[in-house]
Amino acid sequence: MGNRGTGQDGEMMKADDAMNEEARGDFEDEMGGVRSGEGGLPSDWKEAIPSLISSRIAIAQMELKDAMGAAIGKIVSVVVALFFLLLCWLLILVGLIGLIAAKSGWEWYAVMFAAAGVHGVAAVIALACFKAKKTASVFPVTKAEFEKDVEWLKELKREQS
């Protein structure tokens, strides 16, 4: 990776940072220029719930939009790569089956069934590994904001009690 801010990748990072800052500013303007837990919010927690919910939905929508764009690009790239990888593997497999059948004297269909069995075992192992793999946290900003909101609402309830 290079230094941040240098070259074409750095310019793209700067542009992304600028867009994120602009989006945050627009969001804060839309929400009255305050964040949860700061002054200017309703003192009664019941009055704060509608704006709190709408602000959290807006944050989730922004994150979802970014996540969807990135995911779609990755999915398309992976599908294209997997298609060509599968095509390559099929051609290699056909050649190997013909070679093994010719050299060993076995019928081609016996070699094909053996290859299918090996691939079936490999698929089961791959699925077991896939299920065991943990994934990264989804929507970290939204989750953190919800945690702050819970604490803030608890504090408001304590103050009013």
Image: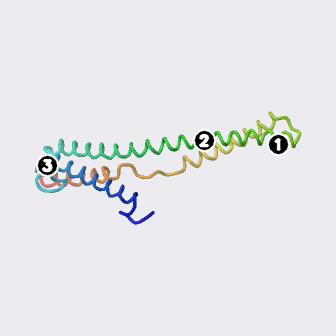
Q: Is residue 86 left or right of residue 59?
A: right
Pointer 2 residue = 84
Which percent across, then down, holds residue 4?
37, 64
Q: Quadrant of the N terminus?
A: bottom left
Give the residue drawn at x 15%, y 46%. Answer: 48
Q: Earlier in the sequence, mark 1 or mark 2?
A: 2
On screen, 67 above or below 108? below
Give the residue drawn at x 27%, y 46%. Answer: 59
Number of residues whose C-alpha sits closer than 10 Å to that of mark 2, classed few (under 14), some (14–19) or many (20 or more) = few
Quadrant housing residue 158:
bottom left
Closer to the camera: disc 1 or disc 2?
A: 2
Closer to the camera: disc 3 or disc 2?
A: 2
Q: CA distance from mark 3 to mark 2?
A: 52 Å
Q: CA distance from mark 1 to mark 2?
A: 24 Å
Q: Is residue 138 left or right of residue 42?
A: right
Q: CA distance from mark 1 to mark 3?
A: 73 Å
Q: Which three-letter amino acid code belongs to the residue tagged 2?
A: Phe
Label 3: element kind = loop
Which percent across, then down, holds residue 108?
82, 35
Q: Is residue 145 left or right of residue 117?
A: left
Pointer 1 residue = 100
Give the residue drawn at x 35%, y 58%. Answer: 11
Q: Which three-letter amino acid code belongs to the residue tagged 3?
A: Gly
Q: Earlier in the sequence, mark 1 or mark 3?
A: 3
